[in-house]
Amino acid sequence: MATLDLVIEPDPRYNSISDRLRIKAEPVAEITEELQQLAQDMRETMIEEKGVGLAGPQVGENVRLIVAHIPAGYEEDVDEDVEITLFNPEIVKAGGRETDLEGCLSFPDLVGPVERYTWAIIKGQDIEGGKVRFRARGVVARVLQHEIDHLNGVLFFDRMESVGLLFYPHELESEEAEADAEEAPTA
């Protein structure tokens, strides 16, 4: 197994981004040993980079492949580790809406509020090529929607009301610390 290089793009508020993540990924006709190895390498890369999901285009591979690893306790609705590898994933049906912060390994440290479905029925093929269909909820549904969007050339900030809402959490923390210092009583 090996870690892969991520496709990294600049902050879209200030720079143009390339088309590398805008291309619609190609369906996988046959799940070969090479594609199975790619899936394993993507999983290792995602974990190394402290991500919870990764799509083929994010490692420069134009294939409809996503991996996800959501550890137990990541959010309150995740009781046990969730490991997912899907080829040719599709959202069959979805419902409910919720806005929450999202980020992306291809835009390091940048986050913003994104509205997503709270549940989704997903179908695709597992790493052995078997057909799967399941219902995902909460953060698992959010991660899978985010990664499937990547396969269609859609980025998380495309789903936001405005890219002006993007921010770096460390900037917010330092602004809050400055505000606290200004409000602190002086002797």
Image (cartoon, rainbow, N blue to C red):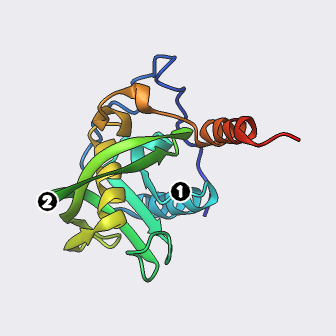
> Which type of secondary structure does the marked residue at label 1 adopt?
loop
The residue under the point 46% across, 33% down is: 166
> Which type of secondary structure does the marked residue at label 2 adopt?
strand
Q: Give the x, y percent position of residue 153.
A: 30, 35
Do we see residue 105 in this rendering?
yes
Viewed as shown, does residue 142 lie left or right of 45?
left
Viewed as shown, does residue 157 lie left or right of 48?
left
For this orientation, the residue located farthest to the left is 93
The residue under the point 89% across, 41% down is: 187
- Marker disc for residue 69: none
Q: Give the x, y percent position of residue 125.
A: 25, 67
Using the image, determine if residue 153 lies above or below residue 84. Answer: above
Do we see residue 30 in this rendering?
no
The residue under the point 59% across, 58% down is: 50
Q: Residue 162: name its quadrant.
A: top left
The residue under the point 30% across, 70% down is: 126
Q: Give the x, y percent position of residue 82.
A: 42, 75
Q: Nearer the viewer, residue 16 or 178?
A: 178
Using the image, determine if residue 97 lies above or below residue 162. Answer: below
Q: Residue 140: name its quadrant.
A: bottom left
Q: Residues within 10 Å of mark 1 (few under 14, many from 20)?
A: some
> Which quadrant of the rendered structure holds the N terminus?
bottom right
Viewed as shown, does residue 81 lie left or right of 48?
left
Q: Nearer the viewer, mark 2 or mark 1?
A: 2
As measured in the structure, the alpha-carbon distance from the residue carrying label 2 to the one carrying label 1 is 25 Å
Disc with the residue nearer the chain's start (2 vs 1)? 1
Q: Give the x, y percent position of residue 59.
A: 49, 44
* Amino acid on which disc 2 is placed: Gly
- Marker disc for residue 95: 2
The residue pinned by badge 1 equals 51
